[in-house]
Amino acid sequence: MSASTAGADTDASSARIPSQRRRASAHEPSDSGLPTVLMGLTVLSGIIDAVSYLGLGRLYLGKMTGNIVVLGISTAQVPGFSLSAPGTALLSFLVGAVLGGRLRTDLGHTKFRWVTVALALEASLLAASASTAGVAAADGSGLTETEILVLIMLLAMAMGLRNATVRKLAIPDMTTTLITLTLADVAADSFLAGRRNPRLNRRIGAVLSIFGGALLGGYLVFRYGLAVPLAVAAALATALAVGYPASCVWRARGRTRR
């Protein structure tokens, strides 16, 4: 085979790859409802952080910055701080993030399937945490240290998976867990700074969503303990895991009819 022929074959093969990707995306259901799903996940983050802060040793499992600070304080052997809880949270979060990255690698060529599986796995982890808390509550003796660590592990894995998935989706102002930068953007892009504040509604919606989730989660923890808010979180995650693919398919059928 001549060099020119080999080069032509390579060019043809390279040209087929984008074409195949375009055909795959053309048959992929619309994900225009994804921002709504992410807003629901933001509410879910507020619930989980309320549960973890009030019931699992003052940890924030949706993000790891504070837990690394607690880990540093614990390493300094400050009285009242333990290495086990923040250490378990950090390691479990990383395991969940690896799982999220693996899903992106294996299924990322079809966003619909990738996101659907990630949502389903998060819902499963939250359901497992709700079951664990429910079994512990049935004993009436409170959570043991082992049960607390199991809950931390399950919730941190779920949030690691979520954060990895959302980072790869890269939808502006929809991190679902980190509101600090969102608040900074609201202020830095405001009219006081001489700017027009793009996506202001989405940014304010994210702040209110995590606030509302924390309000609900805190109330439920205070009134009923950990099992009820975790059951609510699992139910919301399941609704999102079912609703996202259903809405995508519904929109795709609507486009087909037109």
Image: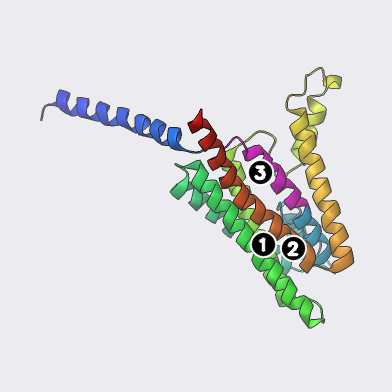
Disc 3 and disc 1 in contact, CB within 8 angstroms: no
Q: Amino acid at mark 3?
A: Val
Magenta span: predominant SS is: helix
Specify whether residue 61 is in view.
yes
**Coordinates of residue 232 in the picture (x, y in percent):** 75, 60
Residue with the most extreme left position: 1
Q: Is residue 6 magenta?
A: no
Q: Can residue 185 be seen at all in this image of the molecule?
A: no
Q: Which quadrant holds the N terminus? A: top left
In primary-sequence order, the first of circles 3 and 1 is 3
Indicate the quadrant where residue 76 lies. bottom right
Disc 2 crowd rating (10 Å Cα; few below 14, some 14-19, many 20+) is many
User: Residue at position x 39%, y 32% from top?
Assistant: 23
Looking at the image, is 41 positioned above or below residue 23? Answer: below
SS at badge 1:
helix
The residue at 53%/56% (across/down) is: 99
Report helix, strand or loop for mark 2.
helix
The CA distance from mark 3 to mark 2 is 19 Å
Give the residue number, with chain letter if any, for mark 1.
Answer: 126
The reply to whether discs 1 and 2 touch (Cβ–Cβ < 8 Å) is yes
Q: Which mark is residue 37?
A: 3
Give whichever of 37, 49 is nearer the camera.
37
Q: Residue at x 70, y 53 (%)?
A: 64
The quadrant holding residue 61 is bottom right
Label 3 Cα neighbours within 10 Å, binned few <14 / some 14-19 / many ≥20: some
Q: Name the residue tied to disc 2.
A: 230
The magenta stretch spans which residues? 31-46
Q: Is residue 36 magenta?
A: yes
In front: 83, or 17?
A: 17
For marks 1 and 2, the one nearer the N-term is 1
